[in-house]
Amino acid sequence: MVALNSWQGAILADHLLSLARELPSIPKAHWPMLGAVTCCLVQSCLVPAPGNPARTDTSRATALRERLRCVVRRNMNSPDFDPEALRRLVAMSRSKLYRIFEGVGGVARFIQDERLDAARQRLADIGDRTSIRALAGEVGFLEHSTFSRAFKLRYGSSPSKFREMVSAHHPLETRDHRHHAGSMP
């Protein structure tokens, strides 16, 4: 865990709170850019303090993991994207790549978790009515059933039940979205 100085923590907290507040009104097309900007801000806040070698090592590892996370997010929609593809893209030895992710269950697990997180975000978006089957493919799962099992294992409910729960908790937003989309209220 890296302790942030007060100004670093304040800047990062303000950005994240603002992003959480404004995200519903920001067009989805801008989300990848916001993610990249947020990654850069996090990395900037984790710049090591001068004369603190422990912080330097931790910061480098964190920055490297975030760089790898960005590469995974850009490529995870391809079902062929796997640990070996990641290793080739970042030109890193297999042993170093696996060492970086050993604390989170390995590289393949990390990639799957990123895919599941992306799917969960899409399922939580009441305006996104992509079918579960199509969504599974869009986040890099070859088989709908594999996606559904992995999602249920990670989040405790099937993707369709998760979507139903989100819709049930936002009935007015769902109605407003349909109204703005041009359908009758």
Image: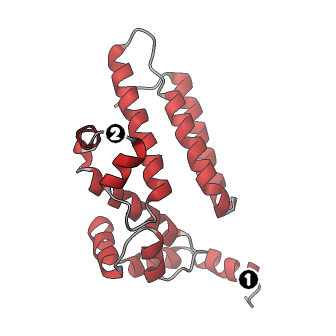
Q: Nearer the viewer, residue 124 or 88?
A: 88
Residue in the image at 55% along x and 70% along y? 125
- The tally of labels here is 2
Residue 57 is situated, as x and y percent measured from the top left of the image, at 34, 23
**Residue 16 visible (yes or no):** no
Direction from residue 75 to residue 101 in the image, left or right: left
- Regarding residue 15, the answer to whether it shows in the image is yes
Q: Which mark is residue 92?
A: 2
Q: Residue at x 30, y 73 (%)?
A: 152
Using the image as rendered, state which of residue 81 and residue 184 is in the foreground: 81
- The image position of residue 118, as x and y in percent, is 46, 62
Q: Regarding mark 1 in the picture, which secondary structure is present there?
A: helix
Local packing at callout 1 (Cα closer than 10 Å; few below 14, some 14-19, many 20+) is few
Expressed as whole percent of the image width and height from the top left, the position of residue 9 reads: 51, 30
* Amino acid type, residue under disc 2 in the picture: Met
Residue 52 horizontal/vertical position (percent): 38, 13
Label 2 sits on a secondary structure element that is loop
Instruction: Select label 1 or label 2 by which is in front.
Output: 2
- Residue 179 — which label? 1
16, 58: nearer the viewer? 58
Give the label on residue 137, or none.
none
Quadrant in the picture for residue 160: bottom left
Lateral position of residue 61 relative to residue 33, left or right: left
What residue do we see at 30% from left, 65% from top?
154
Q: Amino acid at mark 1?
A: His
Comes first in the chain, label 1 or label 2: 2
> If the image is split into quadrants, where does the C terminus sit?
bottom right
Q: Residue at x 36, y 80 (%)?
A: 144
- Farthest residue, direction bottom: 184
The quarter holding residue 24 reads bottom right
